[in-house]
């Protein structure tokens, strides 16, 4: 609960503020996923996904090279 509430959302789009406000409703499901991963020594593929987006800092750039 000490995490900043306005952190950037992850690939699922949920911010820390969402988890803080909805924790009483979702804590059992989150705990079940964590326990499943711990017991089976694996992480569900959907939880280990990463999306990268390049944000250009200069106007008119049309190539990364």
Image (tube, rainbow, N blue to C red):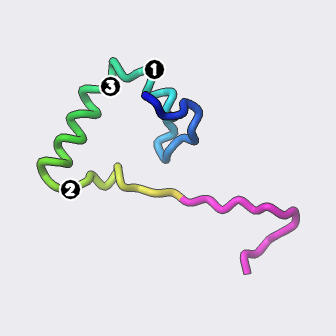
Lateral position of residue 43 relative to residue 46, left or right: left
Q: Is residue 28 above or below residue 50?
A: above
Residues under labels 1 and 2: Cα distance? Answer: 28 Å
Mark 3 vs mark 2: which is more N-terminal?
3
Per the rendered image, the range of residues in magenta is: 52-65
Mark 1 vs mark 2: which is more N-terminal?
1
Could you tell me what secondary structure mostly forms the magenta stretch?
A: loop
Picture disc at residue 21: 1
Q: Residue at x 32, y 25 (%)?
A: 26
Secondary structure beneath dot 3 equals helix
Picture disc at residue 26: 3
Residue occupying the far left of the picture: 39
Q: Residue at x 59, y 33 (%)?
A: 6
Lateral position of residue 39 relative to residue 30, left or right: left
Observer-nearest of 19 and 51: 19
Q: Is residue 28 above or below residue 45?
A: above
Residues under labels 3 and 2: Cα distance? Answer: 21 Å
Give x and y (percent) for residue 47: 35, 49
Residue occupying the far front of the picture: 2
Give x and y (percent) for residue 23: 37, 23
């Amino acid at each position: 609960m000490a995490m900043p509430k306005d952190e950037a959302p992850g690939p699922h789009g949920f911010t820390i503020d969402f988890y803080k406000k909805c924790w009483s409703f979702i804590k059992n499901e989150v705990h079940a996923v964590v326990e499943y991963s711990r017991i089976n020594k694996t992480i569900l593929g959907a939880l280990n996904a990463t999306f990268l987006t390049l944000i250009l800092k200069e106007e008119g750039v049309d190539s990364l090279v």
